C-alpha cells in the first residue's frame, strides 16, 4: 500500500501535469525530515514504475538540495487518472478550543487548550470528524472551532517550523495534534501564564 507521502507526491505531480502538460515535477521540501521521507517515497514510486528520476553522471538524482525532482511515466499517469480516490487525499488544518473532561485528571489544572490538528483525508467533513474523535479520545471536549480549512499545496512551503513538523507527522500517521494548554487562574504562577505544550504519542 502506498504511503501518504507517495500519494501526495503523485497527486501533486499529476495536478501539475493537468495544468501544464509537463510530466516533470519538482517538490520543495520543508525540512530535512520532509526531504528524506520524500526521497524515499519517490524511490518507492520509481520501483513501481510510476516515476523516473533525472540522471546525471550515471547516478539517479531524486533530490538536489531542498528539491525533489522526478518525471511521471505513462504508467504513473494512468494510475493517477484511474485512481481518483488517491488523488482526493488533501491536507486539512484545524484549530479547536477544548476543555479537559472531569476524567482527565492529568490536566485538572488546565482551564482550556487550543488544539492544532492536521489531518490527511479525502473529505473535509471526515477529516473534521476524525479530529474531534482524537480530541475526545484524550479526554477533552471541543468547545469551538477556530480554524477549519483545506491547505493548498502552494501554502505548504510557507508553514512555520512547528506547523511543518505537525504536518509532516500527519503525513506519516494520517493525523497529528498539539495541545497548547492554559492553566486555571488559581494555578498560574505568572501574571500572564505561558501555555504548556501537550503532545500525545
Image (spheres, rainbow, N blue to C red):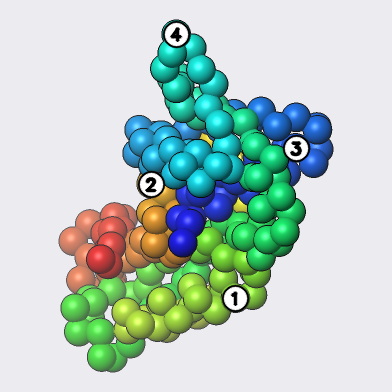
110 or 59, which lies in front? 59
194 or 41, which lies in front? 41
- Give the mark nearest the N terminus, 4 or 1: 4
How many neighbours does mark 2 have within 10 angstroms: few (below 14), some (14-19), or many (20 or more)?
Answer: some
How many neighbours does mark 4 have within 10 angstroms: few (below 14), some (14-19), or many (20 or more)?
Answer: few
Question: Where is mark 1, residue-wise?
Answer: 126
- Residue drawn at x 50%, y 39% is 46
Percent position of residue 171, x then y: 45, 54
Residue 165: image tag: 2
Q: In front: mark 3 or mark 4?
A: 4
Question: Where is mark 3, residue-wise?
Answer: 17
Q: Secondary structure at mark 2?
A: helix
**Left or right: where 70 falls relative to 31:** right
Q: In front: mark 3 or mark 1?
A: 3
Q: Is residue 20 above or below residue 50?
A: above
Quarter of the figure with residue 63: top left
* Quadrant showing the C terminus: bottom left
- Give the mark nearest the N terminus, 4 or 2: 4
Labelled pair 2, 1 in contact (Cβ < 8 Å): no
Amino acid at each position: 500500500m502506498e504511503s501518504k507521502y507517495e500519494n501526495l507526491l503523485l497527486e501533486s505531480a499529476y495536478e501539475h501535469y493537468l495544468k501544464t502538460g509537463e510530466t516533470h515535477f519538482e517538490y520543495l521540501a520543508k525540512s530535512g525530515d520532509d526531504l528524506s521521507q520524500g526521497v524515499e517515497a519517490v524511490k518507492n514510486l520509481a520501483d513501481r514504475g510510476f516515476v523516473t528520476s533525472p540522471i546525471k553522471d550515471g547516478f539517479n538524482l531524486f533530490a538536489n538540495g531542498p528539491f525533489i525532482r522526478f518525471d511521471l511515466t505513462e504508467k504513473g499517469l494512468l494510475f493517477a487518472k484511474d485512481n481518483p480516490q488517491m488523488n482526493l487525499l488533501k491536507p486539512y488544518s484545524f484549530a479547536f478550543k477544548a476543555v479537559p473532561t472531569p476524567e482527565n485528571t492529568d490536566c485538572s489544572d488546565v482551564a482550556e487548550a487550543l488544539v492544532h490538528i492536521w489531518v490527511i483525508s479525502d473529505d473535509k467533513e471526515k477529516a473534521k470528524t476524525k479530529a474531534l474523535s482524537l480530541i475526545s479520545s484524550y479526554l477533552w471536549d471541543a468547545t469551538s472551532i477556530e480554524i477549519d480549512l483545506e491547505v493548498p499545496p502552494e501554502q505548504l512551503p510557507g508553514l512555520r517550523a512547528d506547523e511543518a513538523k505537525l504536518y509532516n507527522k500527519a503525513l506519516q500517521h494520517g493525523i497529528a495534534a498539539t495541545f497548547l494548554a492554559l492553566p486555571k487562574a488559581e494555578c498560574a504562577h505568572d501574571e500572564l501564564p505561558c501555555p504548556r505544550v501537550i503532545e500525545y504519542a
